[in-house]
Image (tube, coloured by chain):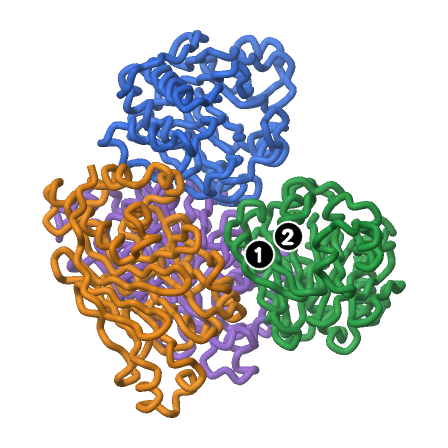
Chain colours: A blue, B orange, C green, D purple
Amino acid sequence: MCRWLAYSGTPVLLETLLYRPRHSLIDQSLHARLGAETTNGDGFGVGWYTDSRDSPGVVRDTSPAWNNRNLREIASHVRSPLFFAHIRASTGSAVQQTNCHPFRHGRWMWMHNGAVTDFHRLRRDLALAVDPVLFSGIEGSTDSEIMFHLALTFGLDQDPPGAVARMAGFVERLGHEHGVEFPLQMTVAVTDGLRTWAFRHSSEGVSRSLFFSNRVETLRRLHPDVTFLREVSDETRLVVSEPLGDLPGAWTEVPDGSCFVVQPGTDELREFTPVALQVY
Amino acid sequence: MCRWLAYSGTPVLLETLLYRPRHSLIDQSLHARLGAETTNGDGFGVGWYTDSRDSPGVVRDTSPAWNNRNLREIASHVRSPLFFAHIRASTGSAVQQTNCHPFRHGRWMWMHNGAVTDFHRLRRDLALAVDPVLFSGIEGSTDSEIMFHLALTFGLDQDPPGAVARMAGFVERLGHEHGVEFPLQMTVAVTDGLRTWAFRHSSEGVSRSLFFSNRVETLRRLHPDVTFLREVSDETRLVVSEPLGDLPGAWTEVPDGSCFVVQPGTDELREFTPVALQVY
Amino acid sequence: MCRWLAYSGTPVLLETLLYRPRHSLIDQSLHARLGAETTNGDGFGVGWYTDSRDSPGVVRDTSPAWNNRNLREIASHVRSPLFFAHIRASTGSAVQQTNCHPFRHGRWMWMHNGAVTDFHRLRRDLALAVDPVLFSGIEGSTDSEIMFHLALTFGLDQDPPGAVARMAGFVERLGHEHGVEFPLQMTVAVTDGLRTWAFRHSSEGVSRSLFFSNRVETLRRLHPDVTFLREVSDETRLVVSEPLGDLPGAWTEVPDGSCFVVQPGTDELREFTPVALQVY
Amino acid sequence: MCRWLAYSGTPVLLETLLYRPRHSLIDQSLHARLGAETTNGDGFGVGWYTDSRDSPGVVRDTSPAWNNRNLREIASHVRSPLFFAHIRASTGSAVQQTNCHPFRHGRWMWMHNGAVTDFHRLRRDLALAVDPVLFSGIEGSTDSEIMFHLALTFGLDQDPPGAVARMAGFVERLGHEHGVEFPLQMTVAVTDGLRTWAFRHSSEGVSRSLFFSNRVETLRRLHPDVTFLREVSDETRLVVSEPLGDLPGAWTEVPDGSCFVVQPGTDELREFTPVALQVY
């Protein structure tokens, strides 16, 4: 339903990854190959850190990414070591800025591709489980924003993978109580400006596509002619809904039921299993 | 914070009342005289019935009314016997279509000028009191939309003034429980396409301005030269946040703590007192 | 690059043709089959006559048609005997309201699918040929709007097919002078509220698709079960960029180099040949 | 009709000047004191250099500046040594992105407050005088954009004050030929990323307000407690439509008929007189 990209590494102009690749996110807004829909034209967002100690800047708009001039301006003039970008395909909820990703809370950013099945039936119970202090920060009407607030409620600040596991477990338990067979379908990226966690999970075991770029050192040996690879650090990494091009050996699929962690030092691929927390 | 207008009577082009009067609602979007703010530029909406048995059409946009060309087109080509129009001045909540008035549910429309004091603190408890079946219909983040859903929850369909009294009473009781001295400030208009109820109330007794137009028969005698008055039926009536012009004798202020009912036959001015319903 | 629809006949709610058909214009905004692009998401417009003696109402917006709620509201509440609808796929010019179709001048409306080749090189000379009195009415930056103003300059009011032929001839002559081999590619619809002229032409002889609906009487015999056909008059007619569904026998392709005239009485299919008027 | 601000000096977050001052440009969008209108809500723009050798980034939007969240995000995350900001009050021309300031051409930016009198009558002749190579770059319908293209035509790149003088002279001569008594009213800022020229002129001698900030050294002595003054270089300078606050001694009015040049080294106040170039 959506497509996203999470970058981490040597500071680059956002356009380097948003516009230049053959199958860039902008191209995916019109011609996604692996998504549920080929068109992702119901708004977009980009969030970037200037410095990992600060809250990120987040620009979101309801127009399609492919024709938005302000996005192009920002992408060609803002440089960042860690940024998120998202293009949206609404499945019914309003096309409004507060429904666009990424969502931000303090120094945290969150973006999502997927859906809570029968969300309209579960929405109230999901919202009630959000920490009352956080409740008033919900501005839109998406499942994604509530999932973020649930993760915040369940300890995102202390234990990101654990909080996301508890969020997913809660959504699934609640869904089952309402007779929903496969309540959750998600690829989520979340960051604190220093590390990024990317999750791929679905209740049914058939989740949306997700890929990470392979180690820059390896890619450089394979493709010594690719300028970008020569200019970025060994720690540079991308996680994307679908590959940005056809460079052989560039991408590894994140398996269903796993979490990929981009962090200083060695990145990690871990298992991910929802934790069925008792909330009420 | 906002300004609104409710028309009922002989079918007219919307522009007759939205654009032509000297101090029209469009003029009020830039130069309100009696409002909390002179500028009401954070979106607008218009809702009209073609036929009182159908659901009304509702067009809302986040741009200022004064420069919106589509509003002008609709106003000069749509004719209606009963319509609402609203211009918004946000006090912080997002400028998005789903926060613009009027709100619609089935054949009902609702618009509001005012505020729930400390809404961010009360929002969760207010939302929880909404009928779970209606909860998923909440798309925006305003107090006004929740007030509407509370009125629907408390029986708007059967007893409009009673439902609004219970809504107001509930908001006030909840506010007091949270230590808010004067929780509610409202002028509300609600209609089912046949009758319109306009309420003026504030917990503090200092409410926003509200006026109704005097009887057409009387005005015709006072101003035999005013074309509009000769062309509309005796039952034609306006309720407005502030007068649309300076015609002597044209307007009567709705007293604080009252409800003005526009209906087939004789219109009525009644007392309005919130009813402190026990909800939980 | 765009898709359009022109309706003429028994007054209907716009939604009857904009939303209800299986392959409606709204569906075409995401999934056009015969267009240069499958996505037409760079704005839309709808123009309708309430009465053929008046200037039409025209509502245009830069957002995609498929997610625009105001379009849906208007379509489900406005009834018209003659209306135009257009969805846009920009080929570079700005996504702005003044670049959306239909364009209006007095009681005339104009919409277009196609392009002037190398428009940026011809734009100035084309603009100079516009009647100086009309020049200041040009608000956007499209070839389509200038084509309309040229047709107005060349006598649209007196002789619509002649004016369009002179416009096309002028564009082609100017293009050739600038070394453009095939300067024009167009399907145009123009109406005065009473009659509609639909043109299909390209300099290369390979023009965009265009269809008209067959005679209602014939269709009724073929499809006695189709409600819409029973409810509309014999004179009801549609001209569309691509068929709205798969009803056998429903559509006839307008041949390249022709003009289809929808008018009171018998509609006509005529030849269309550009006339190479000497302008300077 | 509009308000603007041009900053040059120590790199700062845009918000330092756009949001923080008591009577900031954002405040002026609702409550201008010295403008023709108190409300400047018909769009805004901000253009900034990251490096004076590059083309600036320009973000423009049709919504009011006061409620635009993306502007706030950009302002709180983008740092620049030279930026322009503009808020618009349209006098009739369309509210569209391409009519918002600043305008950009290569490394040049231009913004304007004022008007060409009877522009609709002069528009064609003004447009014809634009270098044909530049003509196709005109995307909107404002006098301001054409003034910029005329200045580019008349040598902005080589001699900015001379080009602006020729532009103003041409507008005035053309206006007089059309019987317009006072054809031009302007405060213009133009920059190449290194130097900024600010012009104040009106044919009638009654021009819009314009101010520059006094020398930082002087202000620091007057107001040793103002943090901002301690943090910026001696060369830091602002030119504004109206003062951003009430700090005594902070502002000097630019006299009518003059040009203020902000540049490395000593800034200059010069006389400005239009030059009535013969164009045709």
Residue B128 left/right relative to C199: left
Residue C196 figure quarter: bottom right
Where B152 falls versus C239 (above or below)?
Answer: above
Amino acid on which the number 2 mark rests in the picture? Leu
| Chain containing mark 2 | C
Instruction: Let me know if residue B53 appears in the view.
Output: yes
User: Which amino acid, mark 1?
Assistant: Ala
Q: Which mark is residue C18?
A: 2
Q: Position of residue A72 (x, y in %)?
A: 52, 40
Label 2 to label 1: alpha-carbon separation: 7 Å
For this rendering, which residue is in front, C158 or B15?
A: B15
Cβ–Cβ under 8 Å for marks 2 and 1: yes
Please state the horizontal and vertical placement of residue D57, each as a whole percent of the image. Answer: 46, 44
Question: As displayed, is residue C11 above or below residue C155?
Answer: above
Q: Which mark is residue A186?
A: none
Q: Name which residue lies at 64% across and 64% down.
A: C103
Q: The disc numbered 1 marks a residue on which chain?
A: C
Residue C75's disc number: 1
Percent of width and height locating residue B94: 34, 46
Instruction: Decide if residue D280 is in sight here.
Output: no
In the rendered view, tell whether residue C21 sits above or below residue C58: above
Count of numbered labels shown in the rendering:
2
Residue B239 spot, x, y in % from top left:
31, 70
SS at mark 1 in the image: helix
Secondary structure under badge 2?
helix
Residue occupying image coordinates x 34% and y 16%: A166
The residue under the point 41% across, 32% down is A121
The residue lying at 50 percent from left, 20 percent from top is A238
> Nearest the camera: C120 or C94?
C94
Nearest the viewer among B195 and A222 is B195
